[in-house]
Image (cartoon, helix red, strand yellow):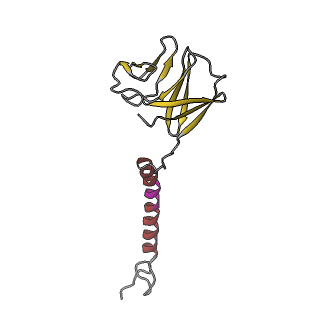
Amino acid sequence: MNKRDPLEESPPGLTSRRSFLDILLGATLFAWLGSMIYPVIRFLIPPKQPDLNVSSLDAGMADAFKRNTAKILRFGRKPVILVRKKGGEFKALSATCTHLDCTVQYKDDTEQIWCACHNGLYDLEGRNISGPPPKPLTPFNVTVKENKIFVTRDESA
């Protein structure tokens, strides 16, 4: 008579112990792979962010802003450089270089806007005067009301 191995067969409708362990091991492996792959996919496909429709920005008090200095401000998601010239008037321009999107800086000794990435220079009107930048900086409107500085989009640009 042949003796049957009780581990190989099970009554109808029930799974064997080996089949159960195979399913459990497969589910564990699948969960582990998912926990490794999911963060990579989330990193590669960033979430959609709504556009911030900022039309005006309060840049602070005019008295607190020294002459021949500049300040980088956030205008929505884009940086803006606000410059107070030696004469006291204000000028606001996009602070993103038109060459490779580096953030520009104000050089008070030459009264120019400088991109440190590839040594691009702009004048205080935003025109590119040397280096690789192909286009001028985008201008913004600046108004001073009751000693407060407001920066708004320049609709003509």
Q: Is residue 73 above or below residue 127?
A: below
Q: Does the magenta segment cover residue 49?
A: no
Q: Is residue 55 above or below residue 11?
A: above
Q: Residue at x 62, y 22 (%)?
A: 65
Query: Residue 78, percent across and down?
Result: 48, 36
Q: Which residues are magenta?
A: 31-35
Quadrant in which residue 30 is drawn:
bottom left
Residue 113 is left or right of residue 130, and the answer is: right
Quadrant in which residue 139 is drawn:
top left
Quadrant in which residue 34 is drawn:
bottom left
Q: Residue at x 46, y 20 (%)?
A: 124
Which quadrant of the rendered structure holds the C terminus? top left
* Residue with the most extreme top position: 109
Q: Residue at x 57, y 36 (%)?
A: 57
Q: Nearer the viewer, residue 31 or 75?
A: 75
Q: Residue at x 43, y 30 (%)?
A: 138
Q: Is residue 55 above or below residue 103?
A: below
Query: Residue 1, percent across and down?
Result: 36, 89
Q: Does the magenta segment cover residue 34?
A: yes
